[in-house]
Image (spheres, rainbow, N blue to C red):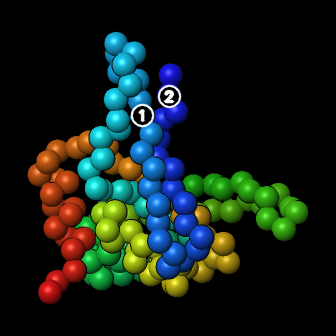
């Protein structure tokens, strides 16, 4: 069985993003490439609902993302500066394109309240063609 998923490497905000395609086994144990749609979900978390709304609305207004979902508050438990911390956070999931991802990352990091913000990208490996086309269209800058 081959590794699954997408590797994502970036040295920091504004650096080029590298995506590596891995493979998934099919039912007959023959490997096949993971289908790439060109659409991604990028996620971050913030500690105030108003900050989540500002990031979501701003990214959509700037056409860096077609839409953004704000999840209800979650409890985060993490180690920071040698201590175990617990915080209430709101997760924002941005629907965007591979092309717009680097600019979205720079934009979010420039407005994010955290010193080291969470930034995770997830590949969209399928979905309705109408929806995926809509995401691509809405995340394209007006010219």
- Frontmost residue, 93 versus 17: 17
Do the CB atoms of the residues marked 1 and 2 lie less than 8 Å apart?
Answer: yes
Residue 42 quadrant: bottom left
Secondary structure category for the residue under label 1: strand
Q: Which residue is mark 1?
A: 23
Q: Which residue is mark 2?
A: 2
Q: Whole-Å distance between the Cαs marked 1 and 2?
A: 6 Å
Q: Tell me if 126 is positioned left or right of 81 in this view.
A: left
Question: Which mark identifies residue 67?
Answer: none
Question: Could you tell me which residue is drawn at 16 percent across and 67 percent down?
Answer: 137
Name the residue at the right extreme: 82
Question: Could you tell me which residue is drawn at 38 percent across and 57 percent down?
Answer: 41
Q: Is residue 35 visible?
A: yes
Q: Of label 1 and label 2, which has the lower sequence position?
A: 2
Residue 98 quadrant: bottom left
Question: Could you tell me which residue is drawn at 63 percent across and 55 percent down?
Answer: 75
In this picture, is 130 found above or below 91? above
Total number of numbered labels?
A: 2
Q: Where in the figure is residue 113, as x and y percent of width and height?
A: 60, 80
- Frontmost residue, 97 versus 83: 97
Q: Where in the figure is residue 44, as x and y percent of width and height?
A: 52, 65
Secondary structure category for the residue under label 2: loop
The C terminus sits in image quarter:
bottom left
Question: Could you tell me which residue is drawn at 22 percent across and 62 percent down?
Answer: 135
Q: How many residues crowd around disc 1 within 10 Å: few (fewer than 14), some, or many (20 or more)?
A: some
């Amino acid at each position: 069985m081959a590794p699954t998923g997408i590797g994502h490497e970036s040295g920091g905000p504004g650096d080029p993003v590298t995506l590596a395609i891995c493979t998934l086994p099919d039912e007959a144990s023959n490997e096949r490439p993971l289908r790439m749609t060109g659409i991604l979900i990028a996620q971050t978390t913030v500690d105030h609902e108003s900050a989540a709304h500002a990031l979501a609305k701003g990214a959509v207004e700037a056409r860096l993302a077609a839409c953004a979902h704000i999840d209800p508050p979650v409890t985060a438990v993490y180690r920071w500066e040698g201590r175990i911390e617990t915080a209430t956070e709101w997760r924002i999931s941005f629907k965007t394109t591979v092309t717009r991802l680097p600019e979205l990352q720079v934009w979010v990091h420039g407005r994010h309240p955290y010193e080291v913000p969470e930034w995770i990208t997830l590949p969209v490996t399928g979905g309705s063609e109408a929806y995926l086309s809509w995401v691509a269209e809405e995340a394209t800058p007006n010219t």
